[in-house]
Amino acid sequence: MLRPYHVPINFPRTMLTKITVVGAGNVGATTAQRLAEKELARTIVLVDVIEGVPQGKGLDQWESAPIEGFDTRVIGANDYGPAAGSELVVVTAGIARKPGMSRDDLVRTNADIVKQVSQQIKQNCLKAIVVVVSNPLDVMCWVTKQARSSSTRPSSTRSSTARATAAPRSSHS
């Protein structure tokens, strides 16, 4: 039986100083919010290329702190300066696959984006662990690893393993 992963309530947890989320779209903004609510870092930096978007979302999330009961600072930026020294970087940057778009088209577009992001991470967050969420995940992890020589972790390892474990097995194997 497959059981969801959980951390015991009394498990000691160290708060990180800074986590950066690259990409302020739906996935990135939600990731930043949940990281802040769980108080996994003192500061969450939300980075995106679209002027004003990460700043607005970061401000909205930080202003929700008294209501939601967390004290993590959420800031938005269009450059990687505020991300300097992050211990963890979550990469959600990239475009969603559009109707009629081939996987190859998505790979080309997102590989260019993730390569640029990875180079910025290498310059500003050299010691950070990088978690890649951007699709197609397998290629984006490879692109990130090529651009950096540090730790890169695919985000869907657990869910992929769960799917493989739960998949019905053929009697011909």
Image (cartoon, helix red, strand yellow):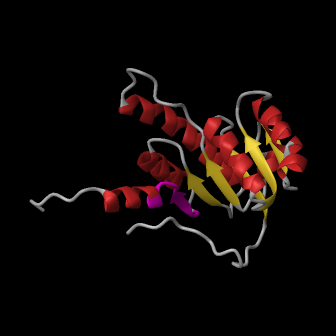
105 and 163: which one is in front?
163
Q: Is residue 141 magenta?
A: no
Would you identify the image quadrant in which residue 14 lies?
A: bottom right
Residue 122: quadrant of the picture = bottom right
Residue 83, given in percent of the width and then of the height, sits at 77, 50
Q: Nearer the viewer, residue 144 or 36?
A: 36
Whether 147 is drawn above or below 135: the answer is below
> Where's the C terminus, which quadrant?
bottom left
Q: Is residue 152 above or below residue 118?
A: below
Position of the N terminus, as image quadrant, is: bottom left
Asked if one can make out residue 124 in the rendered structure from this viewpoint, the answer is: no
In the picture shown, does residue 49 fall above or below 73?
above
Q: What range is drawn magenta here?
A: 150-158
Q: Which percent across, then down, holds residue 19?
A: 74, 56
Q: Residue at x 54, y 48 (%)?
A: 133
**Nearest to the observer: residue 152 or residue 69:** 69
Question: Measuring 88% from the left and 42% from the top, which residue is drawn there?
Answer: 63
- Locate residue 94: give its quadrant: top right
Q: How many marks?
A: 0
Q: Is residue 96 above or below residue 153?
A: above
State the residue at coordinates (60%, 43%): 92
